[in-house]
Image (tube, helix red, strand yellow):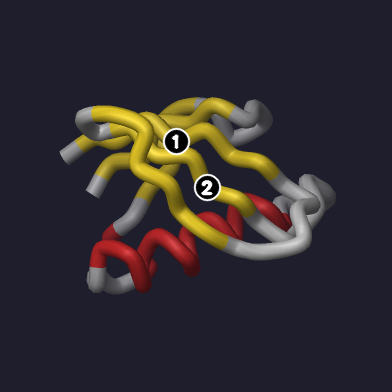
Amino acid sequence: MKYTIIVKPGTSQEKIVETGDHELTVYLRAKPHDGEANEALIKILSKYFNIPKTSLKISRGTHSRIKVIDF
């Protein structure tokens, strides 16, 4: 399954907002430095979808705020 994720790093709270069919906006406290935001994204999405972190993969956009996640 593929999801398009819009990441908003450096916010005051962490939350996930559904913006469309297979589209999410994810607000993260982590800053986009040394992959911290990507790690936080995988962690919050694994809790949201109730799947292991190792099942999630960023297939596109590792250095972008718009990402495609496969699981």
Among all residues in the image, which is located at the extreme left?
A: 1
Q: Residue at x 44, y 35 (%)?
A: 5
Q: Which residue is mark 1?
A: 5
Q: Which residue is mark 2?
A: 26
Q: Position of residue 29 (x, y in %)?
A: 73, 61
Q: Residue at x 71, y 52 (%)?
A: 35
Q: Is residue 30 left or right of residue 33?
A: left
Dot 1: few (<14), some (14–19), or many (≥20) neighbours within 10 Å? many
- Quick check: marks 1 and 2 in contact, CB under 8 Å? yes
Q: Is residue 45 left or right of residue 10?
A: left
Q: Position of residue 63 (x, y in %)?
A: 67, 31
Q: Toward which corner of the image does residue 21 lie, by quadrant? A: top left
- Please tell me which residue lies in front, 44 or 55: 44
Q: Toward which corner of the image does residue 24 lie, by quadrant? A: top left
- Please tell me which residue lies in front, 7 or 33: 7
Q: Position of residue 6 (x, y in %)?
A: 52, 33
Q: CA distance from mark 1 to mark 2?
A: 7 Å
Dot 2: few (<14), some (14–19), or many (≥20) neighbours within 10 Å? many
Q: Tell me the kind of residue under disc 2.
A: Val
Q: Residue at x 47, y 65 (%)?
A: 44
Q: SS at mark 1?
A: strand
Q: Earlier in the sequence, mark 1 or mark 2?
A: 1
Q: SS at mark 2?
A: strand
Q: Tell me the kind of residue under disc 1.
A: Ile
Q: Position of residue 8 (x, y in %)?
A: 66, 41
Q: Toward which corner of the image does residue 45 lie, by quadrant? A: bottom left
